[in-house]
Image: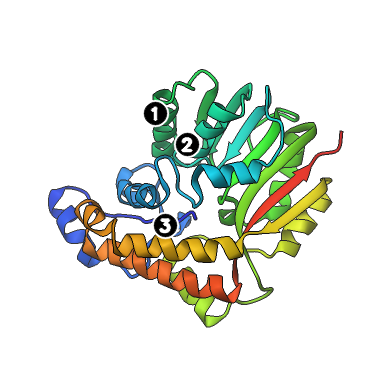
Amino acid sequence: MTTKIGNSAAGEQEAGNKKQEQSTALGRPKEEADMETPEELEYDQDMISLLEAVWGEGFMSPGGTEEIDRVLGDKDLREARVLDIGCGIGGAAVHIALTRHPRSVTGVDIEENLITLSASLAEKNDVSAICDFKQVAPGPLPFDPESFDVVFSKDSIIHIADKSRLAKDIHTILSPGGWFLASDWLCGYEGEPSPQMQAYIEAEGLDFELASAQVYQTALEAAGFVDIEIIERNAWYKNQARIERDNLAGSLYAGLLEQVGEDYLNRAIDVWEKMIVVLDSGEHRPTLLRARKPS
């Protein structure tokens, strides 16, 4: 999950008041965020604290290292040049570096604080020599053709509107025979969302650009990929989301209360409640994506 929870407080007094002043949405669309000032970041420290409490150190989407391994499957990454699109705070990149013996792992994201935290996690785990993290601007991937053997992404493409353009970019920067290995949040409908799905999206308050499995299939095929796999993970996550909600309302509540405040935490629980509704209906569909660039 790529929940983004923005804060607007600056200074101790504002920090004390912010829980009462925030809207009912947890996040703020990118166009309203100013990357130049820390208080305007989408991924601020409150959000990072909450998501790491739920999903583990270094992770801002569900499943931890087990789900990373599921995305990668049995693909051999030894000596591979790996790109992680939307690396967040580095958990996936560091896990790949520790367990898959790549030549290099390059993580990219759009916010400087995430890149700093990713680099710190790599240093903590003694993989800085093969991990590199770069802040990039939204838009085309800034890499030469055939720069990578594997392009990985974990629940980040949901924020990119033009799936076709992204698929073409990934195809271009992959070496012949290279793999695109990802997970993302898809939707189980074409057209407009139901009132329940709209309520969930509004509660998140994010720049979600949801698309169906058919949209992803078409984009990957048009870009030239083969051996395309689209594997739904809804059954797993609708159960996991209940555990996460119960943890937020139970064992994690007191600790997070000290870190993020009551209003913020209760709104996060409300987002999980709304998310469970649309996971149950099948409108919200976490999905694995795999595709190969022909040799």
Can residue 139 be seen here? no
Q: Position of residue 289 (x, y in %)?
A: 69, 51
Which secondary structure, mark 3? Answer: helix
Residue 184 to residue 121: above or below: below
Asked if the residue at tag 2 contacts the one at tag 1, i.e. Cβ–Cβ closer than 8 Å, the answer is: yes
Task: Bin the neighbour count of mark 2 within 10 Å (Cα to Cα): few under 14, some 14-19, many 20 and up.
Answer: many
Q: Position of residue 294 (x, y in %)?
A: 86, 38
Give residue 32's mark.
3
Q: CA distance from mark 3 to mark 2?
A: 25 Å
220 or 12: nearer the eye? 220
Q: Which residue is mark 2?
A: 90
Q: Residue furthest left?
A: 13
The residue drawn where x is 64% and y is 31% is 82
Q: Which residue is mark 1?
A: 120
Amino acid at the residue labelled 2: Gly
* Front tag of 3 and 2: 2
Sequence-earlier tag: 3 or 1: 3
Give residue 278's mark.
none
Amino acid at the residue labelled 1: Ser
